[in-house]
Image (cartoon, grey):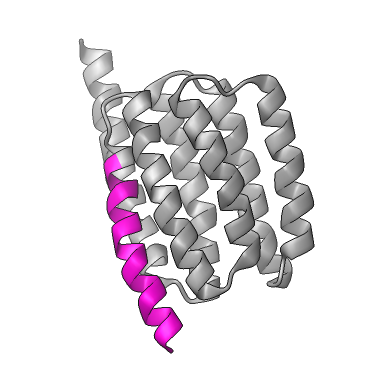
């Protein structure tokens, strides 16, 4: 029971970083906040004993840092994708549920490399949040699960507003 409480307390801070990242004004700031969110998410998943999620987030932390520096190459995308699948399958201790972080990490890895605008970076994050939200509920990380729903709602509103402002300008 203590693991669930501690993991969810860490997840509150994680969600704050995620919310800030989805509302960030530019791609670099999005990824600075994503790095912080990733570290906190890693800590929460370690507490929950969710090893496939932990492994994929270690790889995602590297990916996000390289993307933040605008140095995430095609070669790195391929290597991180292979590592994500290989290591994720080896440490998966949650059956089919444990495959969700693999798919989520692969999706965002592709978006990190190909999406160059802030708008499409955030679209990639929203898609990713759906998968991590489902995973969070499945492993008992309820703060993250509900947080993902709230942040997705805020993110969609922010995207619609930014698209409207761009269209009107």
- Measuring from the top left, give residue 104's x and y in whole percent: 59, 48
Q: Is residue 30 left or right of residue 76?
A: left
Q: How many marks?
A: 0
Furthest toward the top, the residue is 169
Residue shown at 44%/81% (left/top)? 3
Taking depth in this image into account, of 46 and 117 the one nearest to the observer is: 46
- Residue 143, by quadrant, is bottom left
Q: Is residue 16 above or below residue 82?
A: below
Is residue 33 found left or right of 77 in the rendered image? left
Q: x and y percent of residue 6 in the render?
A: 37, 76
Q: Residue at x 62, y 51 (%)?
A: 56
Is residue 18 shown above or below 113? Answer: below
Residue range highlighted in magenta: 1-20
Q: Is residue 153 among the parts visible in the rendering?
A: no
Q: Quadrant of the C terminus?
A: top left
Which secondary structure is most common in the magenta stretch? helix
Q: Judge whether residue 44 is colored magenta.
A: no
Residue toward you, 85 or 59: 59
- Reply above or below: 142 against 148: below
Q: Residue at the spot x=32%, y=51% of the render?
A: 151
- Residue 1's image quarter? bottom left
Residue 4 is one of the magenta-drawn residues: yes
Query: Residue at (56%, 30%) from the top-left corner?
Result: 111
Provide residue 7's location: percent of width, then percent of height.
Answer: 41, 72
Q: Is residue 109 visible to the viewer in this orientation of the structure?
A: yes
Q: Residue 2's x, y, as percent? A: 40, 86
The residue lying toward the viewer, choosing from 133 and 18, is 18
């Amino acid at each position: 029971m203590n693991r669930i409480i501690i993991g969810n307390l860490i997840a509150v801070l994680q969600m704050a970083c995620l919310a800030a990242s989805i509302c960030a004004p530019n791609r670099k700031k999005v990824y600075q906040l994503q790095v912080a969110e990733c570290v906190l998410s890693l800590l929460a998943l370690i507490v929950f004993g969710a090893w496939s999620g932990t492994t994929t987030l270690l790889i995602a932390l590297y990916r996000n840092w390289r993307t933040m520096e605008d140095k995430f190459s095609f070669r790195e995308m391929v290597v991180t994708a292979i590592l994500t699948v290989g290591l994720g399958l080896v440490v998966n201790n949650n059956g089919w549920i444990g495959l969700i972080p693999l798919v989520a990490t692969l999706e965002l890895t592709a978006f990190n490399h190909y999406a160059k605008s802030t708008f499409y970076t955030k679209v990639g994050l929203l898609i990713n949040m759906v998968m991590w939200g489902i995973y969070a509920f499945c492993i008992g990380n309820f703060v993250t699960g509900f947080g993902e729903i709230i942040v997705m709602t805020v993110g969609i509103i922010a995207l619609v507003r930014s698209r409207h402002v761009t269209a009107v300008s």
